[in-house]
């Protein structure tokens, strides 16, 4: 009977495996899309990264009517000059207007881009640290239409610093979020999205109020997905690892700053964050520690149960990595450490939020 204690770990790992099988994977478009597609790229001090992103956008094929819009949002490092040198007149380069009161920077930049592409039928928002494969836009738009949703989030393969922490996002979706139920459910609270690359039906975007409806949201990607749902649309997640890569951070310091600015907004409240963190620590950081302690105490049966709980957590991490183009080994073995590092980042985010010390790209959050 004591082995029934493993039920939560077994159920969560099984759920991860089922979601991995059901996860949408955009493939080649059946034919060239005749839709007018706007690729929207907001940039702020991205001179070192925008080149690779822009070159990948200029190399897109499989779409007959695609326009690239880039908005320079007050860069001081020569970002606009890099764009001009690479694209010439092939890209519509916009200069961002000053940030109005009551807006955060990225929603304001995205709204300006969407306004400039008012005649497009599909909007594809792309961050400057994303590099797309040549048929990525065509494949994603085809999947948007095939799924019949208003917003598709094809999550790219993540590279760069933070290999213990970064994959937790995809793992958390696959482990705790019923993906197909999320697609069918009209509940805005049941939503997820990754802002690195979003593909949105323009009518659904306008009906949801666009980025103006999420102007104050630090997690504008999730807020936009909820707005689409709130106004009658549907959303979907997809594995975009074969279509795009994203080098979000080059160092642990950059990752810490990036996560710190937004984690406080991920849980709804401090108490909600505490409940989530404690649950994760119990499920995934406690078992290996318990294995050692129980073995030392001679409780071999319970030690074996704790070890299996740890291995089930590792298995879930491996399944998530395999399903989303991540690195499975040996990173999965350090899953408990990943959870501990995540917990520390959550605590840091709330601490700096309480002190009013959160900033990003030179702007207060």
Image (tube, rainbow, N blue to C red):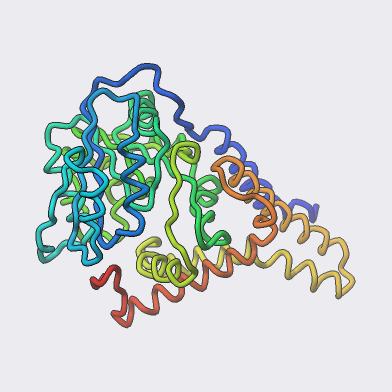
Measured along the vertical axis of the image, is residue 343 above or below residue 81?
A: below
Q: Please state the horizontal and vertical placement of residue 37, each as a whole percent of the image.
A: 24, 31
Q: Residue at x 24, y 58 (%)?
A: 79
Quadrant (top left, top right, bottom left, bottom right) of the C terminus: bottom left
Closest to the observer: 256 or 16? 256
Q: Residue 221: x and y, percent?
A: 31, 50
Which residue is found at the position 40% from the left and 35% from the top?
183
**Relative to 68, residue 299 above or below:** below
Q: Can residue 244 be seen in this snapshot?
A: yes
Q: Nearer the viewer, residue 52 or 314?
A: 52
- In this view, the residue farthest toward the front is 85
| Residue positioned 73% across, 65% down in the render | 288
Up-down: is 304 above or below 352?
above
Quadrant of the image occupied by residue 334: bottom right
Left or right? Give the position of 338 relative to 315.
left
In the image, residue 362 lies at what x, y percent?
Answer: 25, 72
Q: Is 73 left, or right, of 328 in this rendering?
A: left
- Observer-nearest residue: 255 or 189? 255
Where residue 136 sits, quadrant-wise, is: top left
Left-right relation of 147 to 228: right
Kindly tell me whether residue 209 is visible in this rendering.
Answer: no
- Image position of 357 (left or right of 241): left
Q: Residue at x 29, y 73 (%)?
A: 359
């Amino acid at each position: 009977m004591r082995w029934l204690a493993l039920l939560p770990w077994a159920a969560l790992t099984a759920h991860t495996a089922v979601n991995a099988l059901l996860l949408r994977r955009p493939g080649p478009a059946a034919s060239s899309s005749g839709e007018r597609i706007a690729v929207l790229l907001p940039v702020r001090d991205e001179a070192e990264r925008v080149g690779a992103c822009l070159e990948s956008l200029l190399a897109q094929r499989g779409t007959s009517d695609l326009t690239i819009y880039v908005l320079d949002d007050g860069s001081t490092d020569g970002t606009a000059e890099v764009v001009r040198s690479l694209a010439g007149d092939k890209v519509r380069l916009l200069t961002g207007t000053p940030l109005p009161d009551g807006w955060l920077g990225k929603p304001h930049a995205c709204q300006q881009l969407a306004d400039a592409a008012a005649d497009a039928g599909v909007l594809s928002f792309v961050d400057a640290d994303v590099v797309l494969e040549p048929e990525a836009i065509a494949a994603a738009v085809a999947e948007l239409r095939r799924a019949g949703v208003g917003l598709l989030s094809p999550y790219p393969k993540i590279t760069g610093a933070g290999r213990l922490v970064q994959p937790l996002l995809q793992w958390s979706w696959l482990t705790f979020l019923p993906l197909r139920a999320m697609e069918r459910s009209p509940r805005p609270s049941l939503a997820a999205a990754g802002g690195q690359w979003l593909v949105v039906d323009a009518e659904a975007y306008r009906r949801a109020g666009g980025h103006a409806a999420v102007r104050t949201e630090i997690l504008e990607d999730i807020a936009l997905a909820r707005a689409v749902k709130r106004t009658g649309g549907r959303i979907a997640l997809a594995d975009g690892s074969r279509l795009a890569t994203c080098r979000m951070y080059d160092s642990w310091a950059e990752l810490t700053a990036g996560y710190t600015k937004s984690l406080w907004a991920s849980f709804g409240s401090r108490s909600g964050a505490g409940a989530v963190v404690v649950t994760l620590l119990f499920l995934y950081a406690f078992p290996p520690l318990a294995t050692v302690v129980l073995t030392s105490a001679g409780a071999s049966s319970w030690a074996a149960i704790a070890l299996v709980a740890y291995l089930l957590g590792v298995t879930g991490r491996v399944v998530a990595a395999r399903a989303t183009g991540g690195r499975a080994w040996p990173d999965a073995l350090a899953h408990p450490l990943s959870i501990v590092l995540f917990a520390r980042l959550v605590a840091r985010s709330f601490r700096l939020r309480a002190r009013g010390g959160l900033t990003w790209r030179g702007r207060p959050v």
